[in-house]
Every structure is written in C-alpha cells, then in structure tokens.
Amino acid sequence: MAAPYVAVVGAGGDVSSDVLAVAEAVGAELARRGAVVVTGGLGGVMEAACRGARSAGGTTVGILPGGDRGAANAFVSVAVATAMGELRNGLVVRSADAVVAIAGGDGTLSEIALALKAGKRVVGIATWEIDGVRAAAGAAEAVALALSLA
C-alpha cells in the first residue's frame, strides 16, 4: 500500500513558537506513521512541519511558489518549483490525500477552501472554523484523524 500524502498548511511568516511547536509535532507524527508530508516549502508552519518530519526520518515535498528550488527550506526532501505564486496553493492540496491546517491567515484560508472544493478531507488545529473542517485539539489527534480520512 502506498504511503498517504498529507499536506500541512499554515502561515509562512511571523508565527508564534506555540504554533511552530504544534506544526513540528504534526510533521514528526505523520512521518512516524509513514505519511509523506507536503507543504508549500517555505518558512513558518511549513518549515516546522518539514523539520518534524525529517527528524522522524520522513519524506517531505515542498511545492514552491517561485521558480527556484533553492528557495525551499532546509528540511524539504523534494522541492518542486512552480513559478505560480499563490496559485501553487491548489497544487499543495491537490497532491495530498488529506490536509492539516494549523492556525494561519488568508493563504491558509485559500488552501482550506481549495481542499474542500476538491473533496479533500481537512483537519484544523486553531484555524478557520468552516463547515467541512474537522477540529482537532492537538497534533496527535489531528494526525490520527487526517490519516483515518486519507
């Protein structure tokens, strides 16, 4: 059976240490459970999730908004340079079997909406409260739920 792909989405800019810790825990738990972690490949929640996954021996895919693979954070195993800007958000969620949204702003909102529109299952931790997003209290619950829905 092929490994599930789970996208972890959230803010790439200024993010609290608490949110980063949750993202890192989500990435690590996904990797421990055999999932491939897909992100937008940059900083913030994306980098923390990739760091967690790599620390647990996992594979990470970064789908970048720009055209330079070298822009990926240091914890991305496979960088995909799209040169599509925010339009790459659709590729992030379309490439995944399920999505975990952690906090986040407008970009995260767009990823949630695109995922729901595509029929993808979305689990949220302290993020937008939208019909179709299953709320989880923390990393372990979010990962268990996402993998059960993938």
Image (tube, grey):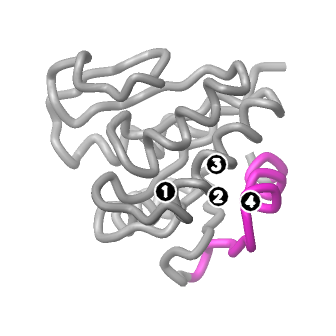
- Residue at coordinates 40% horizontally, 23% vertically from top-left? 74
Residues under labels 4 and 1: Cα distance?
Answer: 16 Å
| Neighbours of disc 4 within 10 Å: few (<14), some (14-19), many (20+) | many
Looking at the image, do the residues carrying marks 3 and 4 touch, with CB atoms under 8 Å apart? Answer: no
Kind of element beneath mark 1: helix
Residue type, numbered disc 4: Ala
Residues under labels 1 and 3: Cα distance?
Answer: 8 Å
- Residue at coordinates 79% horizontally, 46% vertically from top-left? 147
The residue sitting at the front extreme is 17
140 falls in the magenta region = yes
- Residue at coordinates 69% horizontally, 72% vertically from top-left? 134
Q: Which residue is mark 2?
A: 121
| Neighbours of disc 2 within 10 Å: few (<14), some (14-19), many (20+) | many
Q: Which mark is residue 142?
A: 4
Q: Image quadrant for the N terminus?
A: top right
* Range shown magenta: 131-148
Looking at the image, do the residues carrying marks 4 and 2 touch, with CB atoms under 8 Å apart? Answer: no
Dot in front, 4 or 2 = 4
Q: Which mark is residue 115?
A: 1
Kind of element beneath mark 4: helix
Residue type, numbered disc 3: Ala
Residue type, numbered disc 2: Arg
68 falls in the magenta region = no
**Foreground of the two, 115 or 6:** 6
Q: Which mark is residue 98?
A: 3
Answer left or right for 4 relative to 63. Answer: right
Q: Image quadrant for the C terminus?
A: top right
Dot in front, 4 or 1 = 4
Looking at the image, do the residues carrying marks 1 and 2 touch, with CB atoms under 8 Å apart? Answer: yes
Q: Position of residue 131 (x, y in %)?
A: 58, 82
Residues under labels 3 and 4: Cα distance?
Answer: 11 Å
